[in-house]
C-alpha cells in the first residue's frame, strides 16, 4: 500500500506534497510553494511574492509553508503582512494553505476568518488544549515523527477526528509507513481505513 506524505522535503518521494525551496525547479509531482517566515526579506517582499506566483502550476497543491514564528528575527507585523498576502493568493486560486507556526497559534487562529480555503498546521506537536482550539476553528492537523514517541502527543492524536488528520515526514529521515502504522494502532483502526480517510481528506481540502 502507498501512503501519502502530506509535507516533505525529499525529491525521491512522489506520493506526497513536496515543499518547494527558493532555489528548486518545479517537480513533476505535487508540491507546495510559499514564503516561510524565516525567508522573508524586508526589501524584497514584492519580488518574493512574484516568485511565489510564478511557481504556481497545475501540480501546485497548496500555498505554504507559510505562517508565523516567534523565533525568527522578522518583525511580527511584517510576518503577518506576508502571511495575509499568501492567504489572499490561496483564496484567489482556491488552494489550501500549509502553515508553519511556532508559538503563535492564537495569532494564526485570528487569521482563520480571512481564509476561504482549508488551513493545515504542519508538524503539529503541541498540547491538547491548543489542538482543541485549532480544531474548533476548523483547522486540520498534520502529525509527524513526534507521534512515534511523544505520549502527550499520542493522547492529542486520540482526540483529533480522523477527518482532520494528515501525516508527514517533513525533513526527518524515516519511512512514512511507520507513522501510518503507529497512528492506526493509536486510533484503533486498520491501516486501510486510515489510508482511505486521509486520501478522502485530501480530496476535501483540494476542492474546498
Image (tube, grey):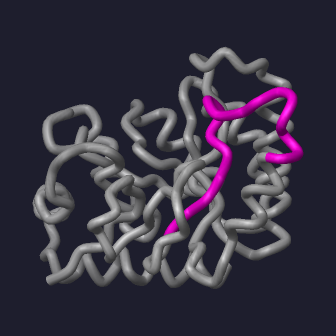
Q: Is residue 8 left or right of residue 37?
A: left
Residue 7 locus on image (x, y percent)? 41, 58
Residue 8 locus on image (x, y percent)? 37, 56
Range of the magenta residues?
A: 31-47
Q: Residue at x 24, y 74 (%)?
A: 3
Q: Residue at x 37, y 70 (%)?
A: 16
Residue 103 falls within the magenta-colored stretch: no
Do we see residue 16 in this rendering?
yes
Question: In the image, is residue 111 above or below residue 7?
Answer: above
Question: In the image, is residue 54 above or below residue 146?
Answer: below
Closer to the camera in the image, 114 or 2: 2
Residue 179, located in which quarter of the rendered image? bottom left
Query: Looking at the image, how many numbered discs can be counted on the residues?
Result: 0
Do we see residue 154 in this rendering?
no
Q: Residue at x 38, y 53 (%)?
A: 9
Closer to the camera in the image, 108 or 137: 108
Question: In the image, is residue 171 above or below residue 44?
Answer: below
Query: Which quadrant: the N terminus?
Result: bottom left
Question: In the image, is residue 8 above or below residue 15?
Answer: above
Closer to the camera in the image, 107 or 43: 43
Residue 185 locus on image (x, y percent)? 11, 60
Q: Is residue 102 left or right of residue 77?
A: left
Residue 38 falls within the magenta-colored stretch: yes
Closer to the camera in the image, 112 or 38: 38
Residue 120 locus on image (x, y percent)? 55, 56
Residue 167, located in which quarter of the rendered image? bottom left
Query: Which quadrant: the C terminus?
Result: bottom right
Amino acid at each position: 500500500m502507498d501512503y501519502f506524505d502530506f509535507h516533505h522535503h525529499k525529491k525521491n518521494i512522489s506520493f506526497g506534497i513536496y515543499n518547494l525551496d527558493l532555489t528548486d525547479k518545479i517537480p513533476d509531482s505535487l508540491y507546495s510553494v510559499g514564503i516561510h517566515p524565516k525567508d522573508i526579506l524586508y526589501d524584497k517582499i514584492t519580488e518574493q511574492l512574484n516568485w511565489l506566483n510564478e511557481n504556481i502550476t497545475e501540480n501546485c497543491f497548496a500555498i505554504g509553508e507559510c505562517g508565523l514564528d516567534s523565533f525568527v528575527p522578522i518583525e511580527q507585523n511584517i510576518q503577518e503582512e506576508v502571511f495575509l498576502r499568501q492567504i489572499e493568493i490561496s483564496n484567489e486560486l482556491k488552494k489550501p494553505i500549509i502553515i508553519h507556526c511556532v508559538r503563535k497559534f492564537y495569532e494564526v487562529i485570528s487569521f482563520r476568518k480571512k481564509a476561504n480555503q482549508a488551513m493545515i498546521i504542519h508538524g503539529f506537536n503541541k498540547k491538547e488544549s491548543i489542538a482543541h482550539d485549532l480544531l474548533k476553528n476548523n483547522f486540520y492537523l498534520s502529525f509527524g515523527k513526534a507521534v512515534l514517541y511523544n505520549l502527550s502527543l499520542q493522547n492529542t492524536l486520540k482526540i483529533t477526528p480522523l477527518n482532520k488528520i494528515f501525516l508527514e515526514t517533513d525533513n526527518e529521515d524515516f519511512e512514512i509507513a511507520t507513522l501510518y502504522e503507529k497512528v492506526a494502532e493509536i486510533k484503533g483502526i486498520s491501516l486501510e481505513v486510515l489510508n482511505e480517510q486521509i486520501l478522502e481528506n485530501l480530496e476535501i481540502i483540494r476542492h474546498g
